[in-house]
């Protein structure tokens, strides 16, 4: 019976987009692009696709040494990038977006997990994205200049696994992992000394959110949990959080054991997913170009 149940879930998750409205994008079923090569990546709880380095994905573990890993969409290991002066505590998601230098892409790594809901603040690390060549031999290198952004919830500690950056405003968004996910915004510029108080701005129609991303042009948002994923389309000139009050667009997902990571590709024309388990596949879901937003 359990196998039948899992098969039914898998069938539902790999189905096409079930739209709540006519403005929903449609994504095709996922294709396996490869497997994560480096066995040291055994808890890939976050993933981001580089916009300046062609065919490069960034992932990180939930725990262990404070570093990020570069790999190709096929899973080829490109490098270990150790973040100098940084602590590792429940890293749950990674995002790419703008920051202080308008000509630079930044990695944002979210130390935002809090299973006991006891942390007085959570931390996002921001650092200029390193240069990576998708054909390079694997490297091990230190990355300096990491900034620490300490964020405080307005209504008490929360456990969260979703970190997103609005590319139009540089605001940070965090979604809690509660039964109905609560969405918080830390407006730019976030403090690099002291703490930034977030504001509660919206909620998800469901909970247990494990990953999310915003497309590079700021027009689409995707959020997943273990069993499904949804997209929202942002209307022109509206704040990002307002999108969650619009149509929810169900998008395909392949059933993954402890699946947490999801991110748009560099152009926002598809998205990748992977799981926290060791040596896991990477899946890519291309957008149906006839339903392109």
Image (cartoon, rainbow, N blue to C red):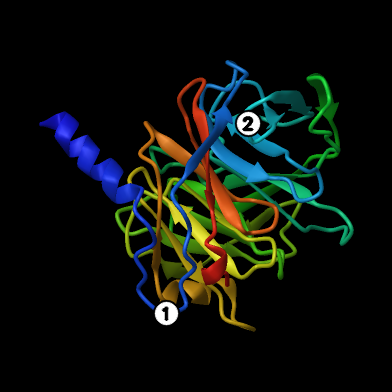
Label 2 secondary element? loop
Residue 266, numbered label: none
Residue 238 point in image, percent of width and height: 59, 81
Q: How many numbered markers are drawn?
A: 2
Label 1 secondary element? loop
Q: Is residue 237 above or below residue 289?
A: below
Q: At 49% across and 20% down in the image, what residue appears?
A: 278
Q: Is residue 30 above or below residue 166?
A: above
The furthest residue to the bottom: 237
Q: At 35% across and 73% down in the image, what residue appears?
A: 20
Residue 143 point in image, percent of width and height: 83, 31
Identify residue for label 2: 74
Query: Marks 2 and 1: CB-CB under 8 Å?
Result: no
Residue 91 point in image, percent of width and height: 56, 36
The furthest residue to the top: 39
Q: At 87% across and 62% down in the image, what residue appears?
A: 102
Q: Quadrant of the N terminus?
A: top left
Q: Counting other residues with Cα less than 10 Å from the Cα at mark 1, is it few (<14), some (14-19), or many (20 or more)?
A: few
Q: Nearer the viewer, residue 273 or 203?
A: 273
Q: At 73% across and 38% down in the image, what residue appears?
A: 56
Work out whether residue 153 can be spotted: no
Is 250 left, or right, of 183 in this rendering?
left
Q: Quadrant of the C terminus?
A: bottom right
Q: Counting other residues with Cα less than 10 Å from the Cα at mark 2, is it few (<14), some (14-19), or many (20 or more)?
A: some
Q: Quadrant of residue 290?
A: bottom right
First in sequence: mark 2 vs mark 1? 1
Work out whether residue 250 can be spotted: yes
Identify residue for label 1: 22
């Amino acid at each position: 019976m359990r196998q039948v149940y899992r098969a039914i879930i898998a069938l539902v998750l790999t189905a096409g987009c079930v739209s709540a409205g006519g403005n929903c994008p449609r994504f095709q079923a996922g294709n396996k692009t490869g497997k994560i090569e480096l066995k040291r990546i055994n808890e890939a709880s976050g993933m981001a696709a580089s916009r300046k380095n062609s065919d490069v994905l960034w992932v990180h573990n939930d725990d262990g040494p404070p570093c990020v890993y570069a790999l190709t969409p096929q899973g080829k290991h490109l490098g270990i990038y150790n973040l100098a002066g940084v602590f590792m505590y429940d890293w749950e998601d990674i995002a790419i977006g703008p920051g202080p230098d308008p000509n630079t892409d930044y990695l944002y790594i979210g130390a935002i997990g809090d299973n006991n809901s006891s942390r007085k603040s959570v931390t996002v690390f921001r650092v200029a994205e390193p240069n990576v060549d998708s054909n390079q031999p694997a490297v091990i290198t230190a990355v300096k200049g990491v900034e620490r952004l300490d964020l405080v919830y307005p209504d008490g500690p929360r456990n969260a696994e979703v970190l997103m950056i609005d590319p139009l405003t540089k605001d940070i968004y965090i979604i809690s992992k509660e039964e109905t996910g609560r969405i918080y915004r830390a407006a730019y510029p976030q403090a690099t000394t002291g703490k930034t108080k977030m504001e509660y701005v919206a909620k998800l129609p469901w909970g247990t959110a494990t990953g999310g991303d915003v497309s590079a042009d700021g027009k689409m948002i995707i959020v997943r949990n273990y069993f499904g994923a949804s997209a929202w389309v942002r209307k022109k000139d509206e704040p990002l959080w307002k999108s969650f009050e619009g149509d929810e667009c169900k998008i395909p997902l392949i059933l993954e054991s402890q699946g947490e990571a999801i991110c748009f590709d560099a152009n926002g024309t598809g998205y990748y997913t992977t799981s926290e388990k060791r040596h896991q596949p990477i899946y890519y879901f291309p957008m149906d170009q006839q339903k392109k937003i």
